[in-house]
Image: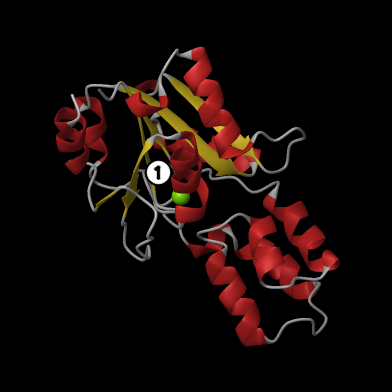
Amino acid sequence: MIRAIIFDLDNCLSAADEVGPELLEPTFAAIRQANNGTLSDVALEQAFADCWRHALDYVAARHSFSAEMLTAGWAVAACTEVKTPMYGYPDLGALVELPARLFLVTSGFRRLQDSKIRALGIGSLFEAIYVDAIDEANRKGKQGIFKEILGVYALEPAEVLVVGDNPASEIEAGNHLGMMTVQILRAGVPRGGNAKHHIHRLYELKVLVTQNE
Ligand SMILES: [Mg+2]
């Protein structure tokens, strides 16, 4: 029986670029300025596109940023926050109908992730919210946080469903712990091979939860 659902935030409950591409433009400008010919313009744009789906340290490693590029981008990204209201995907109303305890676990810069949760006004929907902050010491990572939820809320892995867009992040962490994983295929999200289920809308979750009663 499913008793808890752990949600990812970016590209799961709200599009990472909901407030517009200008959100990360100052970060990209700082990286561009520190580039000094390390990457071609084309390679740089590909890396920036990845920044909407992956954490900055991951993107930097994958696209061979110089240490200067990562440092410059990191300094700006750590101060970035959303100051306008956000609305999330239009199916967020499905969350209140789910017969389970809901948790939110999101990775990224502390200030930005906190500001998005505030802008969305969704805090009260969740039993607990965890930011896996990439700019804080002693980072537990998603798997560490999922494990903590199991302990604190006395849940068995089989009682927990994990919902997110990223096969290498929450889906992998959930699989590793023996939780049921669901990849949500929001616009632009490539289908991964490691989730137990795939959905397009949050409304589809209610069926999955009740099927596993
Ligand atoms: Mg995500």
Relative placement, left or right, of 108 versus 104 is: right
Position of the N terminus, as image quadrant, is: top left
* 8 in relation to 21, above or below: above
> Which of 140 and 47 lies nearest the eye of the viewer?
140
Relative placement, left or right, of 125 versus 80 is: left
Among the 4 quarters of the image, the one containing residue 101: top left
Residue 27 location (% of width, % of height): 67, 61
Instruction: Inspect the image, locate mark 1, and give the three-letter code of the amino acid beneath it.
Output: Met
Residue 206 location (% of width, % of height): 18, 34
Query: How many discs appear?
Result: 1
The residue depicted at 36 percent of the width and 43 percent of the height is 13
* 158 in relation to 16, above or below: above
Position of the C terminus, as image quadrant, is: top left
* 151 in relation to 32, above or below: above
Relative placement, left or right, of 110 versus 71 is: left
Residue 151 location (% of width, % of height): 52, 16
> Which of 152 and 92 lies nearest the eye of the viewer?
152
Relative placement, left or right, of 120 versus 51 is: left
> Which of 78 and 195 lies nearest the eye of the viewer?
195
The residue depicted at 81 percent of the width and 59 percent of the height is 71
Would you call the spot at circle 1 few (<14 residues within 10 Å), some (14-19), or many (20 or more)? Answer: some
Residue 5 location (% of width, % of height): 35, 29
> Which of 162 and 126 lies nearest the eye of the viewer?
162
- CB at mark 1 closer than 8 A to ligand 1? no
Among the 4 quarters of the image, the one containing residue 61: bottom right
Q: Read off the residue under disc 1.
A: 86
Q: How is the image coloured?
A: secondary structure
Among the 4 quarters of the image, the one containing residue 26: bottom right
The secondary element bearing badge 1 is classed as loop
The residue depicted at 73 percent of the width and 82 percent of the height is 39
